[in-house]
Image (cartoon, grey):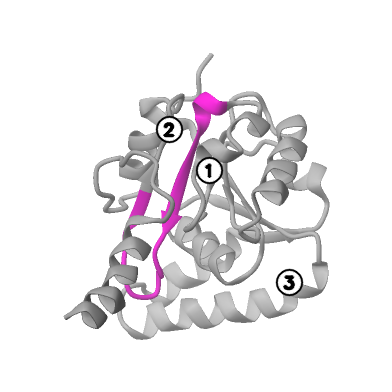
Amino acid sequence: MALKIDDIRKILIIGAGTMGQQIAFQCAISGYKVVLYDVEPAIFEISMKRIAKLAGSFRNSGRLTPEEAEAALKRIRFSSDPEDAAKDADFVSESVPEDPALKAKVFSQFNLLCPAHTIFTTNTSTLIPSMFAEATGRPDRFAAFHFHDTRVTNIVDIMPHADTSAECSQKFSKRRRRLPPEAWPEWRTSIGHGWASCIPRSGLSA
């Protein structure tokens, strides 16, 4: 049976770097249980401190109450064990380095570990999802979900590929109260990065 969007409870973030940290926190404040996975457990101490700082920023700016910020932090846990991280995951967001071979390897690994219903997404900003869609083992439940800097905005760019289902590319984003543009066709950069990259070129040509 296909996963219903409202049935999503647990989110796995692959990659505990800057964007993985921000995505994990954004998912946690939306009420989801979050597992932040990385192959290097040494990064977890830094990640925890940065997420706590992000929570403080949201609290101090009035975007979250102290109670909401604390509750969000409690929904996040860390793991360097892929089997533990993948168990019962309903949704995956990948934020590993921009290497298509590495992303394909990671998705192939977690395809064997995650439940059959799990939706896979990549946070890539420079690659297109079709480059490693087959490696996910579930191309119909795979798309690029590129999060902007969650400290300053509430936008995610959605880039499906030819086989992405409508549920994967649209409904989950709405459920999380994100503010996405319509799903865009594949383009070798995220929408935000594309706009930003046009600025210096247009300035030089003026």
Which labelled disc corresponds to residue 44?
3
The answer to which quarter of the image holds residue 174 is top left
The amino acid marked with disc number 2 is Cys
Q: Position of residue 189 (x, y in %)?
A: 42, 56
Q: Is residue 90 above or below residue 30?
A: above
The amino acid marked with disc number 1 is Thr
Q: Per the image, is 154 magenta?
A: yes
Q: Nearer the viewer, residue 63 or 185?
A: 185
User: Which quadrant holds the N terminus?
Assistant: top right
The answer to which quarter of the image holds residue 86 is top right
Of helix, strand and loop, which one carries label 3? helix
Residue to which mark 1 is pinned:
121
Which mark's residue is nearer the viewer, 3 or 1?
Answer: 1
The residue depicted at 24 percent of the width and 42 percent of the height is: 182
Q: Label 3 vs label 1: CA separation?
A: 22 Å
Marks 2/1 in contact by CB < 8 Å: the verdict is yes
Q: Taking 69 as reference, is 200 left or right?
A: left
Of helix, strand and loop, which one carries label 2? helix
The answer to which of marks 3 and 1 sits earlier in the sequence is: 3
Residue to which mark 2 is pinned:
168
